[in-house]
Image: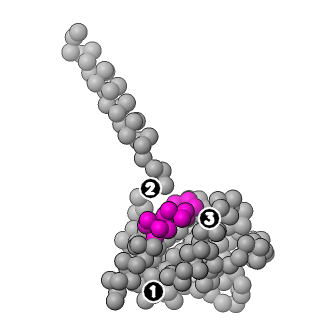
Amino acid sequence: MKPRHLIPLGLFLLLTILLGVGLTLDPREVPSPFIGKPAPTFDLPQLHDNALNLTPEEMKGQVWLLNVWASWCVSCRAEHKVITSLANTKEVNIVGLNYKDQREDALLWLKQFGNPYLASVSDLKGRTGIDYGVYGVPETFVIDQQGIIRYKQIGPVTREAVAEKILPLIRELKAKAS
């Protein structure tokens, strides 16, 4: 076999190996460029009272979660029990970012399924979601006492993610502050 015939064979083998490695990766583990950076700021009206706004600045000094959700999101319904269970532990405050949703629909959804949020704000046009790099709902962010994003969960929060990643990180961040 001539050496010039080995080049295409070598390239084919390399591409096959790269494809094989790529198929073993979890698409939910997409690294976020926001990890380790300050959480984008927002000043949005609260769902339950449009006269009240909420900003991340109000959450400084505590570890908190920002959970991006919508009433039209099927996966949000699937994760809602997990988010509610996490809120019931009282280990972390959860702020909801209602994404591209009508206020009436969002309020009805919370009434029907329960409200685990300290507050939920309305991002009707999706600009804040874009600032956070959201490309689908649900997504959840762990934000530390200084307002730095420490973790991003793409897709529904699962019991495993809470037990293995989210709660240990929250506890670690709180211990560092003590």
Residue 45, visible in the rendered structure: no
The foreground one among 162 and 146 is 162
Name the one closer to the observer, 101 or 143: 143
Q: Position of residue 113 (x, y in %)?
A: 73, 72
Q: Which mark is residue 62?
A: 1
Find the distance from the CA under tag 2 to the CA under tag 3.
Answer: 17 Å
User: Within 10 Å of the Cα at label 3, are there few (<14), some (14-19), or many (20+) other Cα atoms?
Assistant: some
Residue at numbered disc 2:
29
Q: Judge whether 15 appears above or below 4 on screen.
A: below
Q: Earlier in the sequence, mark 2 or mark 3?
A: 2
Residue hosting label 3: 79
Note whether 95 is above or below 73 in the view shown: below
The image quadrant of residue 107 is: bottom right
Which quadrant holds residue 144?
bottom left
Quadrant in the picture for the C terminus: bottom left
Q: Quadrant of the N terminus?
A: top left
Residue at figure coordinates x 64%, y 68% from the top left? 80
Residue 178 falls left or right of residue 135: left
Q: CA distance from mark 3 to mark 1?
A: 23 Å
Three-letter code, disc 3 = Glu
Task: Tell whether 46 sits left or right of 141.
Answer: right
Residue at image x 45%, y 86%?
A: 62
- Tell me where residue 61 appears, x and y as whole percent: 43, 89
